[in-house]
Amino acid sequence: MRKLKNSELDRLTVDEFKGATKTPIVIVLDNIRSLNNIGSVFRTADAFLIEKIYLVGITAQPPHKDIHKTALGATDSVAWEYRENGLDLLQELQTQNYELIAIEQTENAQMLQDFKALDTQKYAVVFGNEVKGVAQEIVSACNTIIEIPQYGTKHSLNISVTVGMVIWDLWSKLNAR
């Protein structure tokens, strides 16, 4: 088997991306510290045609060299917006008929593999701070809590890994026809 060259991958241009039909998901980054994690989320959002990323609280915003280093230009293709207050944002998204989902470990959380995504629903998926996770007030405002099952000794996954797993899973379920 021959490895494909980038020129053979038939990717969209930035303008084509902006005009393409998007996956009905917005990503909410709740107080993310790492600029590299933020850049990685932009790349994942680009890969799966995500509608928009909301950068909340202390989450840094492009342009920044450390975000750019891992985003590799995805900050130019993926729509994004900064919001100071996550609760206000979630209330606004709820009025736009988004199902609010926090990715967190809580009592009665639904395991990722058990979550049934509907292709008629829009989703706002909240990912939290690398140390503290999603703030309790944000968790309380969400309709659904999803947990990624883990079986080892650690209590969490890196946020960029978590975003990749969750967005791939939701994208797969929304596009399974």
Image (cartoon, grey):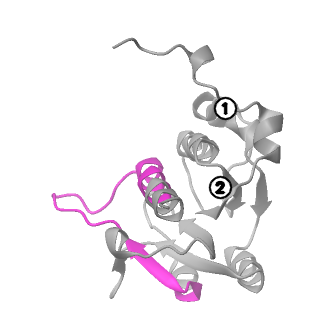
In the image, 176: left or right of 100? left
Q: Could you tell me which residue is drawn at 49 percent across and 73 percent down?
A: 117
Which of pointers 1 and 2 indicates the residue nearer the eye?
Answer: 1
**Residue positioned 47% across, 48% down in the render:** 160
Q: Position of residue 112 (x, y in %)?
A: 36, 69
Give coordinates of residue 113: x percent, y percent.
33, 68
Q: Which residue, given by chain and number where applicable, does mark 1 sit on?
A: 68
Please state which amino acid type lies under the numbered disc 2: Thr
Of residues 163 and 39, the one nearer the viewer is 163
Q: In the figure, is residue 150 to the left or right of 137?
A: left
Residue type at the position of mark 1: His
Give the position of the N terminus as an image quadrant: top left
Tell me where residue 124 sits by quadrant: bottom right
> How many tags in the picture?
2
- Please report the bounds of the magenta region as a residue range: 140-167
The reply to whether callout 1 and callout 2 are in contact (CB within 8 Å) is no
35 with respect to 159 (left or right): right
Q: Position of residue 97 (x, y in %)?
A: 72, 82
Residue extending farthest front: 177
**Looking at the image, can residue 63 be seen?**
no
**Residue 104 found in image quarter:** bottom left
Residue 165 in the magenta stretch? The answer is: yes
The answer to which image quadrant residue 92 occupies is bottom right
Q: Is residue 119 visible?
A: yes
Judge whether residue 89 is colored magenta. Answer: no
- Spatial distance from mark 1 to mark 2, Cα to Cα? 14 Å
Q: Is mark 1 on a helix, strand or loop?
A: helix
Residue 80 in the image: state x and y as whole percent: 76, 53
Instruction: Answer few, some or many: residues within 10 Å of disc 1's Cα (few below 14, many 20 plus, some between 14 and 19).
Output: many
Mark number, residue 59: 2
